[in-house]
Amino acid sequence: MGETPGVYIHIPFCASRCDYCDFYTVTRRGDLFEPYTEAVCRAVATAPLEAGREVGSVYFGGGTPALLGPKRLGKMLAAVAKRWVFAPDAEITLEANPVAVTGAALRGFREAGFNRLSLGVQSGADGRLRDLGRIHTAGGAAETVRLAREAGFENLTLDLMLGLPGQGVEEGLFSAEFILGLAPEHISCYLLQLEEGTRYAARYREEELDEESQRAVYLAVCDRLEAAGYRQYEISNFAKPGYESRHNLRYWTGAEYLGIGPSAAGYLGGERYSFPRDLEGFVTAADPWSLPVDEGPGGGEEETVMLRLRLADGVDTACCPGIPGLLERGRRLAEQGLAVVEGSRVRLTREGFLVSNGAIEYLLWEV
């Protein structure tokens, strides 16, 4: 992957809000599509990342970026390409919702320069999709994948949600088989978290998310995806060889990335920052870079441990001499089946991934 930075552009628009989502998004604001496009281009042109620098990944996330269409997104991507130089193998990702894009739009996105498409499929069961507040069907998702392939996308990542209320191993594997049948290069499997203020949190209680059921579903699906040739390289992410998300790996390995847009975060020059969750403030700002809040320094040893333990390869404790006893505590986790210790490297097992917050807290207890 190298040390080239990545660029993240947040597109906060959605056609409707999913019941479980707490990302910063807005609906029914098509009047801001054009002003937002111009605001992003202004932010790119004045960004605190040196002009002419090589970038290895660009990620348009949201929200539902595809709502803005090929012309607006192409204009933003062209602004990025004018400001910086894309690495020869640059990964340029666009998030989209199934059935929210046409074949013509997908061809337009591909022609604009996007070479990776991320689709929020979430489930292969129509009833579950309705419960999640999704507006597509399983059949619609399959059709969108077909259209994406026809448009020339050779790198697809599909999202799958696990650990849903009342979901058992059978349902989890059913959706996993549905995703596998669509033959993506990359699969993201997220365990549901009830987020305060969402319709899902109002409808379900934490007690209804049985931990043992979530554990069984997660482990069963992980095993099935691995058997199908997808390597688990991060707690929630699986890929065919060579198709790991280069952009997201920048987050977990401590590489630099520039974030643009309301709620977007970035990490440059050892410092972290974030934009306020304020769409209209971003659109109207003459200087977008007067808006971000300084989040302080990043890249320290504690952060390195927290981020790298999300990865299947784990962390080399030799790079963290300021955390005494780290390797020894890793050995204790290994005795419980939660970690593997290989030389000075500690990595979590799948059982460890399921309790990663607690495992990491234990490893860092002296910090």
Image (cartoon, helix red, strand yellow):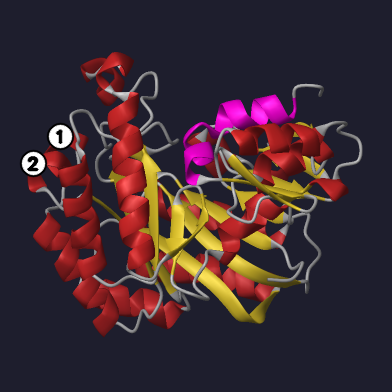
Residue in view at x 81 percent, y 42 percent: 271
Q: Please, what secondary structure does the residue beneath circle 1 have? A: helix
Give x and y (percent) for residue 284: 56, 41
Residue 155: where, in percent of width, then height?
41, 75
Residue 356 is drawn in which quadrant?
Answer: top right
Q: Tell me if I can see residue 253 in this picture.
A: yes
Residue found 61% across the figure and 42% down from its top? 339
Is 134 displayed left or right of 287 in the figure? left
Relative height, residue 265 to residue 316 (above, below): above
User: Is residue 256 within the magenta segment?
Assistant: no
| Pointer 2 with pointer 1, Cβ within 8 A | yes
Amino acid on which the number 1 mark rests in the picture: Asp
Q: Secondary structure at mark 2?
A: helix
Query: For mark 1, what is the residue?
Result: 131
Q: Position of residue 176 (x, y in %)?
A: 24, 56
* Residue 168 image-quadrant placement: top left
Most common secondary structure along the magenta stretch? helix
Which residue is label 2 attached to?
127
Residue numbers of the magenta segment: 350-364
Under mark 2, the amino acid is: Gly
